[in-house]
Image (cartoon, grey):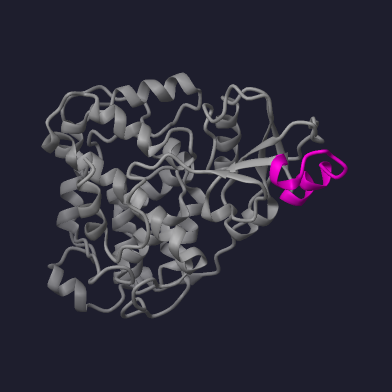
Amino acid sequence: MQDLFGNTLDANPILFPTDYNSILERLQHINPIKYAKSRNFINGSVTYLAPYISRGVVSLKQVKEIIMGKGLKPIEIEKLLQELAWREYYQRVWQEKGNLIWQDLKQGQPDTAHHGMLSALQEANTGIKVIDDQISKLYSAGYLHNHIRMYLAAITCNNAKAHWMQPAKWMYYHLLDGDIASNNCSWQWVAGAFSSKKYYCNQENINRYTNTNQANTFLDKSYEELATMPIPAALKVRVHLELQTNLPATKKLNLDTTKPTLIYNSYNLDPKWREHEDVNRVLLLEPSHFNSYPVSEKVIEFVISLSRNIQGIQVYCGEIADLKALYQGSQLSSKEAFISKEHPAFNDYPGIKDSREWMFPEVTGYYPSFFSYWKKCEKSL
């Protein structure tokens, strides 16, 4: 398969290798110029780095430094840096808002008919052929092109008038690059709950960016018509969304409680983190976390596979309280015994919390829009 510029892609570009050397090689093949020109096309020259960034295998800072080290003009790298900054912006929103990330952030989602899940979405039966094909690929490969995600959210929230939360949970469940901040905020941006207006797509736009030519669908209208039309018949049926995480059985932990334990999780799988220190290393998969934020078995397998890049790591499916119990009677205090990386999903971890590697560490706090945030970031470039 080739992208728009004739570059040969992997035989199946939506499959993601999990060995660290392959990930680093993918980093080196980033092409900011081609990305800027073609990123919105389904076969555009995108980076395929999202699962590694969201899982903390590589950092946004690391990607930024590689891009800036290519000797390109600022205008040639700006678009890719800006798109990466969206992810960091959403993380800052999550830091500031905490669990409010699960509520409409700016205003109630306009023109909402219900808070359910669409049967057409879950069954890949919207009637928009390329969308249904891509939903099937989400199930099989755990990945969607960003433009397809926007189309799905627009159809769900703005044509079917469903509230964003249940469909967002459904998408997060299946994505290898699932990131609560990016997922929730992006759905809200499309739905008009975290933006000044709703985002609509029509059939002409979908055809253009997916290289298709479908016609006579409920989206084969002008944007003015889409904004006022009733819910299409294909999108009226709702279903109850049931999502459950199946965690594997794991062995009893073997910890040397005279040494601290580095706690890894599904958002921190960095093989280089404190790599030369003499410590215990545990990938902690907490049932309580996945009860709140369920993911598919495919996602869990991907996380565990990525963790194998970390020398000496033990995988444990249990709670943080189980780790703390192992240190009872140890000479190390709870603060000394555990080290993790700061993350809003894991504020309950005890001990030392290292900072993540931010693209723009000096730009902190909440900004009401991405572009107000980006103006601050630009000053440091």
Picture coordinates of residue 273 (x, y %)? 54, 30
Q: Residue at x 15, y 48 (%)?
A: 208
Point out the stretch of residues depicted in magenta: 320-337
Q: Is residue 182 visible?
A: no
Residue 287, relative to residue 337: is it above or below?
below
Q: Is residue 109 magenta?
A: no
242 lies above or below 40: below
Q: Measured from the top left, where is residue 381 in percent x and y?
A: 21, 40
In the figure, 117 relative to 359: above or below?
Answer: below
Instruction: Write the residue at 54% across / 40% down.
Output: 268
**Residue 74 on image: x %, y %:** 14, 35
The answer to whether residue 54 is seen in the rendering is yes
For the N terminus, the image quarter is top left
Along the line of sight, the residue nearer the viewer: 214 or 345: 345
Q: x, y (%) of residue 357?
A: 42, 39
Q: Nearer the viewer, residue 305 or 262?
A: 262
Left or right: where does residue 319 sit relative to residue 265? right
